[in-house]
Image (cartoon, rainbow, N blue to C red):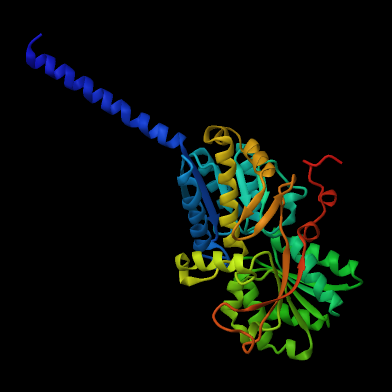
Amino acid sequence: MSRIQRRAVLAAAAGAATFGAAPARRARAQANTIKIGVMNDQSGPYRDIGGPNGVILAQIAAQEFGNNRGFNVEVVSADHQNRPDVGANIARQWYDQGVDMILDVPTSSVGLAVNSVAREKNKVYINVGAATADLTGPQCSPNTAHWVYDTYMLAKSTGGAMVRAGGDSWFFITADYAFGHALERDTSTFVRSNGGRVMGSVRYPFPATSDFSAFLVQAQASRAKVIGFANAGADTINCIKQAAEFGITRRGTKLAALLMFIADVHALGLESAQGLVMTESFYWDLDDRTRAFSRRVQPRLNNRAMPNMVTAGNYSGTLHYLKAVADMGVAASKASGIETMNRMKRLPVEDEAFGRGTLREDGRMLIPSYLFEVKTPAESRGPWDYLKLLQTTPADEAWRPLSEGNCPLIRS
């Protein structure tokens, strides 16, 4: 063989080795990378509750934890458009393409759809944004955890407080999908158990409604002492604004925003929102820990917003998941979503946003809930100083008892 021929053969062999090494390196990198998909509303009525800021807080948790523990963490995001079919398709594609955990997923109908896909694919799903308590009840899954709030907790705290304050007759304006139905159902249970009455309800098309005037007229005609808004986000804001335009509160009727966030208060302004009561499991100004956490992450959030319980929940859920991955190893965590969730349940939950918590066997994360009242403009000391604490419900009392949830994972 000539010298030129020998050189050509050696060059070809080197090229083949290089060509074969690149896929091998990519495969090793992928095997050592945990991929998290944040799915939420990026463009609709729940955008300001989670949306881009929910993605950012998941990214912050990933950067702070994963890249310092010997493995890489990648965060991707998508807009589910508040449609169960879109959410289920994204979840199926993500899991098939290597996403290990899906996070957030507001809109209960979408959350329930993703819950089924995660179980089918044996992957991890941490629900933060969807409220339906059915995720730890009849629809509970060994692959799913439910972080920070649900319809039972909201109904017990806000609904119970309104009844105790004399609001013993209710009319509901309800978003016509799983979340609205569950919130109306759970709040009605607490109203009746405290001696109150439900005078009626009306359900409106979601998310295609912005004019609530006809529904408010029906509510007012019922002569109920409380109008309960079983909705969230832009819908709640519009309901409260239009109720003020109708002068409903001047006639003595109380408004119950059964799910409200600090972003909603910010959008309404204290002049319109003052006096409303609301329940959260996180408030940036609750204590020294939450203040330090919020001021640390706020500069990275869109519009310099303060975190709320959903965006802070994305941070907390991501962090706890990655602790489980580090504890059991990347390969083992990728192999089984159920085993990863079991490890999450065995590990103590603790972070800057929520302090200490417990992940119960039905997937419910147990932390205290807090009942707040929106301050008057005169009481506020500055931007985002919107809430004053009325009462705290301890973690072991805030959530539906395990024995009452009808979760099929729990043996009677």
Asked whether residue 100 appears in the rendered view, the answer is yes
- The residue lying furthest to the top in this view is 1
Q: x, y (%) of residue 137?
A: 77, 50
Q: Which residue sits at x=65%, y=86%?
A: 376
Residue 278, placed above or below residue 315: below
Question: Residue 242 sits in which quadrant?
Answer: bottom right
Q: Quadrant of the C terminus?
A: top right
- The residue lying furthest to the right in this view is 195
Q: x, y (%) of residue 399?
A: 78, 58
Nearest the camera: 214 or 252? 252
Q: Which residue sits at x=55%, y=66%?
A: 292
**How many numbered discs sit on the rendered protein?**
0
Q: Is residue 185 left or right of residue 83?
A: right
Q: Is residue 189 left or right of residue 33?
A: right
Q: Is residue 175 left or right of residue 37?
A: right
Asked whether residue 42 appears in the rendered view, the answer is no
Residue 304, placed above or below residue 153: below
Q: x, y (%) of residue 128?
A: 63, 56
- The residue lying furthest to the front in this view is 288
Q: Which residue sits at x=80%, y=65%?
A: 156
